[in-house]
Image (cartoon, grey):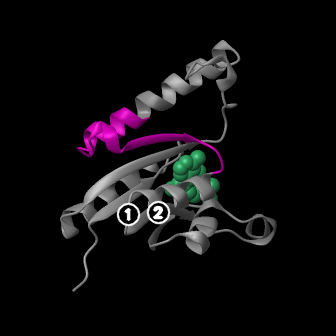
Amino acid sequence: MTTYKQILLAFDFSDETDFLIKRASEMAFLNNAKISLVHILDNIPMPDMSYGTIIALNDETDSALLEQQKNKCNEIGKFLNVPETQRWLIWGNPKDEICALATQENIDLIIVGSHARHGLALLLGSTANGVLHHAPCDVLAVRLATK
Ligand code: AMP
């Protein structure tokens, strides 16, 4: 039987993230797999790299938000025993960056949350849907309570 060896958990900061973490932990245990973590920074403007700094954010709110997201990522990483080198915070579009990272890291299973959507929300699409259609590997879309 094929098992997964490299699992990528893509998380946002919604209330349901704990449920996703539990699922990722179970999948890793059942498959004896390694976990990588990714959060895409799609709500903080990208710093201006032309000034040669890694994080030169525009104002204190952005820096505070980034710090908060880093802390959360590290918290989840410690809980799941994910080495620091496998905890990713990336600027960009969630669907594109999650799929690109999966290719780069030879991921064989991406775990994302999925909300049951209807009507306009369905037309607008979702991160889970985007990942499902562009991923280079299997995707586990964990059904979450509707927002
Ligand atoms: P959404 O469709 O945007 O409500 O999100 C569904 C799932 O996509 C979430 O439960 C996460 O697994 C993933 N996701 C959404 N936004 C991000 C993000 N910025 N970074 C990483 N994963 C995300």
Q: CA distance from mark 2 to mark 1?
A: 5 Å
Q: Residue at x 74, y 69 (%)?
A: 122
Please give the count of numbered marks on the rendered protein.
Answer: 2
Image: 37 above or below 109? above
Region rendered in magenta: 73-93
Spot the residue most to the right. 120
Q: Which class describes the residues within 10 Å of circle 1: few (<14), some (14-19), or many (20+)? A: some
In the rendered structure, does residue 92 fall within the stretch colored magenta? yes
Q: Which residue is mark 1?
A: 106
Secondary structure type for disc 2 = helix
Amino acid type assigned to the residue bearing label 2 in the image: Thr
Residue 134, image x and y in percent? 59, 70
* Badge 1 element: loop
Q: Is any atom of residue 147 visible in this view?
A: no
What residue is shown with label 2? 103
The amino acid type of the residue labelled 1 equals Asn
* Nearer-the-camera pick, 23 or 4: 4
